[in-house]
Amino acid sequence: MVITRWLYVSILSAAVMLLVTAIPIDSFFSSENASRSIQQSDVLFKIFGQLRHDIGAIFYIKADEYYHGGTEHPFGETHHLEDDASLCGGPDEAAHEPARESPAEAGKNGGYDLFTRINRSISSHSVIHLNKDQSAELLPWFYLATLFDPQAVQAYVVGGFWLGMQMGKPEEGIAFLRKGLRHNPDAWELYAQVGELYFIAKKDYGKAAPYLQRAFSLMKQSEASDFDKKQVLVFLAAAMEHLGNLRESLAYYEQLSGLFNNNTIILGKIKALRSVLEEEPLHAR
Amino acid sequence: MKTPLLIAVNLTRELFRKKDLYVLGILLLVLLAYVIQTAFFGVKDIFRYVKEIGLGIVFLFSIIIAVPFAARSLLEEIATKTIYPLLAKPVTRWQVILGKYLGCLFVSGSAFSLFFLLFAAADVYNQGLTGLALTLQVYGAGILMLLVLNAITLALSVYCTFSTTVTLSYLIYFLMTWFGGSLRDLLDTIPSAGLAIYYLLPHFEFFDLRHRLVHLWEPVPGWVMLFLAFYAVTYSLLALIAAFLGFRKRWL
């Protein structure tokens, strides 16, 4: 009898506790998610919640795996997919060492047991980069990565690069990157990639310049590396030069010179631009 | 040998009586057609993705059929008490186990073969004939995988309930397929026992050659295929012995 009464009291108090705590929890979630109304209307977001970031990452890794011919990303390799544009085509053991063995695989006495040998025979292969005409094989994974995780900036950038530069589809590449910009309006990487596509693939310097300028201004607010700044500044300075804005171009080259530790080529470029600008008033007269 | 075969044939009829095979077959066809016709950014000539998704579905559907079928084969006989007339005949318990195993193997093998055939036809339609030897190896390895999976599921069903058997079988299969290759590093940290556990676990990852076919690597050496066959037969035999030992002592 006592136990039954104790049980009733416990259940009642637990229910009261739940009600009390449920109100702040609910209000917390509604305020937390108020800014995520767009995400909440997304079906994938409703199904997978925050897990979709991980699923998107898995698809992005899949693209990397495909690029390496089905092998894992080589141990210690730090490049991006886009860095390997020139390396496309066939086995490339010189650029990548084969995947390193784990201590267990190597065996304490230097030998391999049968199971390890079987595993290696089945799942190991030297690194092969996709040929240029096989680039399309990567596309589904970029698409899926961004479908599941619209905040996957890297997937947009690399996917846009492959579409625009490798597959000769700059329009599709730019459209893909713009889709990324709708979800990530402050990602300098996306602006930079759109600018580069306009610059290199379409040679439309007028459209490239504002994207590169936006990228550079966002870079200053973020923790972008000097390497990235150099890459954007090179295109930006050249775009301005193509457009005839020599003063702006000179200003960007001067910033570039600071990052390149007074590189002789950049210094030469600055010298040439200054001499042109000095001659300008004479022409005007 | 005649008695186990009769039990197996009787069990096989179940597959065609139930709708699972037809539903999954139609679903596979629909999914393959969808995957093949999908164009990404206006590009249609995408083959590896189709292979990866297609093979993934083939293996998944085959396992969806194999595991519950093997888990149910013996437990249903006991639950519905049809095991009594069966054992009243001059049929030993070992023959029952062997008959059920052969039946399950035939059922899952037929389903896998049908699904694989549909996939292969879709792949030839999409890309043309490529990597025939490797395709046959993937198919062979899939059948060998079913040999082990059915034996393990049947053995578990002798000791566990239906739901436990199904859950454990799926867990073992998926965990070993995904992480079996890297398990050695983890188990190596446990002195002596770790290595023994590593060798005792069913290495389903050995039978997963899909990756090679997707990326068109060269076929695996003949000695590897021979080892896979030897491993599958040995492991299945050990699992069947375990099933028999449990079933022999089981009070019915």
Image (tube, coloured by chain):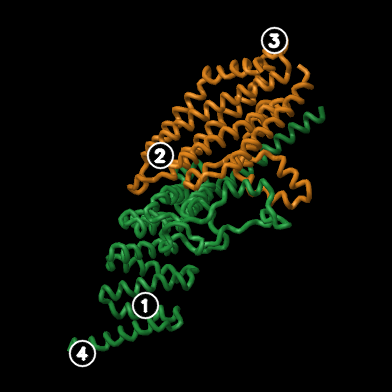
Query: Which residue position holds label 3?
Result: B85
- Amino acid carrying label 2: it is Leu
**Residue drawn where x is 48% and y is 52% of the image:** A69
The numbered mark, 3 or 2, whose residue comes first in the sequence reads 3
Badge nearest the viewer, 4 or 3: 3
Residue A17: image quadrant is top right
Q: CA distance from mark 4 to mark 3?
A: 113 Å
* Element on which disc 4 rests: helix
Q: CA distance from mark 3 to mark 1?
A: 91 Å
- Amino acid carrying label 3: it is Pro
Query: Which residue position holds label 2?
Result: B129
Q: Which chain is orange?
A: B
- Amino acid carrying label 1: it is Tyr
The answer to whether the residue labelled 1 contacts the one labelled 2, judged by CB atoms less than 8 Å apart, is no
Q: Badge 4: few (under 14), some or many (20 or more) residues near its Cα, within 10 Å?
A: few
Q: CA distance from mark 3 to mark 2?
A: 51 Å
x%, y% of residue A108? 73, 57
Q: CA distance from mark 4 to mark 2?
A: 72 Å
Q: Which chain is green?
A: A
Badge nearest the viewer, 1 or 2: 2
**Residue drawn where x is 77% and y is 21% of the image:** B248
Q: Is residue A274 above or below residue A225?
A: below
Query: Which residue position holds label 1?
Result: A252
Query: Which residue position holds label 4?
Result: A282
